[in-house]
Image (spheres, rainbow, N blue to C red):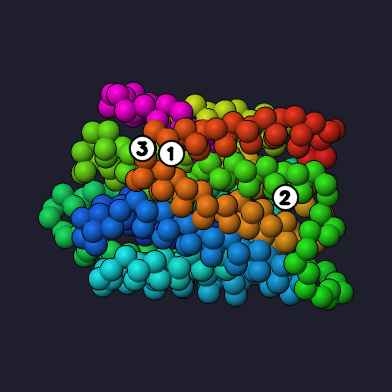
């Protein structure tokens, strides 16, 4: 595996480095958002659900728009640069927000940037490597992305421990944001054959039936997968000290970093179906277990470790599967639709979860998510993959 890993093109490693730096900034702030909204801006779970739902829905819509445009223009770099620029200038502005509505606007800008860059970046990765290296390529990217998510919370925990005010920590995010934009400017477009320019099309026309079934089920699963901020809020309520919340999130990212690349690399040799099914089953178990209020701290830490393994076994493998199912020349559109459907469902997912969490009981919220994930698991096993597999790399 190491030989294959180090033989990957420069573009793959550079994109991974950009994601590492950008996520160090993003994840330095992410675990602090529930605390910031609750203690500084006095906003509850409903506001959190609205903010995260709208932010992620915005990101998802622009992932489709940028993906379709990239397939027609064959230009990925401009969208990647603009995307990281918007995120870099948006995050530090949270420090001057005086209400949760301003946080909503800023998160909108941040996620707009993510929407513009994600599908072009994934398409660039898919075009830069051999089809037989898709699993390890997307796994490496996700591992480097999650490595940044390890550093970010550790930085946040350190700044909190030395007495830096919660609001001021958001200003520090501007430094890695500037670095990420500078690295993105160093990307190179791959050599492409001249092709006939096609009109923009926002439909699923030309995408195979199995892909269409897959993104539908992925959307149902996304309805279960609300904002991770709720997990951190739940952990705090179950007894995890405030100063350990960033460390807990860093531990999840560390597990994803360590196991993401090898698990994704294995999917290049074995069926990606098995990796995704096992991971989704672990997700169902995790959410069902989180519904219990009598969970000890050690059991809670173990559950979050399972959640980290779930992310490691799906983040790279799911994207590799999308690349496998996408027809030639339609990678951007395929990633756009996958990101749109799975991300757009985060709006109702976060709104429903936040409503159940605050209006009734956190247990009902977690049981709802676990049930939706269980339905998606059954559909994936017996409907999406019920027909002969067409996911072998071309």
Residue 128's spot in the image, x, y percent? 69, 57
Q: Name the residue at 74% across, 75% down.
A: 73
> Which disc is residue 323 wearing?
2
Labelled disc at residue 365: 1
Q: Which mark is residue 115?
A: none
- Which of the marked residues, 1 or 2, is nearer the chain's N terminus? 2
Where residue 131 sits: x, y (%)?
75, 47
* Tag nearer the camera, 1 or 2: 1
Specify whether residue 320 is in view.
Answer: no
Question: What is the CA distance from the residue labelled 1 to the residue labelled 2?
Answer: 33 Å
> Which sits in the foreground, 17 or 67?
67
Q: Secondary structure at mark 3?
A: loop
Rendered view: 157 above or below 374? below
Badge 2 density bin: few <14, some 14–19, many ≥20, Cα 10 Å? many
Q: CA distance from mark 2 to mark 3?
A: 40 Å
Q: Residue at x 84, y 33 (%)?
A: 387
Residue found at the far right of this picture: 196
Mark toward the viewer: 2 or 3: 3
264 relative to 298, above or below: below
Horizontal placement of 289 versus 131: left or right? left
Q: Earlier in the sequence, mark 2 or mark 3?
A: 2
SS assignment at label 1 = helix
Residue 301 part of the magenta-drawn span: yes
Q: Position of residue 388 (x, y in %)?
A: 85, 33
Q: Which residues are magenta?
A: 287-313
Q: Which mark is residue 361?
A: 3
User: Disc 2 on helix, strand or loop?
Assistant: helix
**Quick check: marks 1 and 2 in contact, CB under 8 Å?**
no
Q: How many marks?
A: 3
| Residue name at image x 47 percent, y 48 percent | 352
Quadrant of res 383: top right
């Amino acid at each position: 595996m190491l030989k294959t890993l180090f033989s990957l093109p420069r573009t793959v490693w550079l994109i991974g480095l950009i994601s590492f730096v950008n996520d160090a900034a993003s994840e330095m702030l992410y675990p602090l958002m529930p605390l910031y909204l609750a203690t500084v801006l006095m906003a509850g779970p409903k506001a959190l659900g609205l903010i995260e739902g709208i932010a992620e829905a915005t990101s998802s819509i622009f992932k489709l728009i940028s993906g379709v445009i990239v397939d027609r223009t064959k230009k990925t770099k401009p969208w990647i640069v603009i995307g990281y620029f918007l995120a870099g200038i948006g995050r530090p502005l949270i420090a001057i927000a005086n209400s949760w509505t301003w946080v909503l606007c800023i998160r909108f800008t941040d996620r707009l940037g993510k929407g513009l860059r994600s599908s072009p970046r994934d398409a660039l990765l898919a075009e830069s490597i051999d089809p037989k290296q898709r699993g390890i390529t997307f796994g490496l990217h996700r591992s480097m992305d999650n490595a940044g998510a390890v550093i970010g919370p550790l930085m946040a925990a350190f700044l909190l421990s030395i007495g830096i005010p919660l609001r001021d920590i958001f200003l520090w995010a501007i430094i890695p944001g500037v670095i990420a934009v500078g690295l993105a400017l160093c990307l190179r477009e791959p050599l492409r054959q001249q092709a006939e320019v096609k009109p923009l099309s926002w439909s699923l026309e030309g995408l195979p039936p199995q892909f269409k079934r897959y993104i539908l089920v992925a959307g149902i699963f996304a309805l279960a997968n609300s904002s991770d901020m709720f997990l951190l809020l739940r952990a705090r309520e179950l007894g995890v000290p405030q100063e350990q919340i960033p460390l807990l999130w860093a531990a999840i990212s560390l597990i994803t970093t360590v196991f993401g690349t090898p698990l994704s690399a294995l999917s290049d040799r074995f069926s990606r179906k098995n990796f995704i099914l096992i991971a989704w089953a672990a997700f169902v178990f995790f959410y069902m277990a989180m519904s219990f209020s009598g969970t000890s701290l050690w059991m809670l830490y173990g559950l979050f470790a399972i959640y980290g393994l779930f992310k490691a076994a799906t983040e790279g493998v799911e994207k590799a599967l999308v690349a496998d199912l996408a027809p030639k020349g339609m990678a951007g559109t395929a990633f756009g639709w996958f990101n749109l459907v799975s991300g757009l469902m985060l709006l109702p997912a976060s709104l429903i979860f936040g409503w159940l969490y605050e209006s009734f009981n956190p247990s009902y919220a977690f049981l709802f998510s676990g049930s939706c994930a269980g339905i998606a698991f059954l559909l994936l096993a017996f409907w999406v993959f019920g027909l002969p597999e067409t996911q072998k790399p071309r």
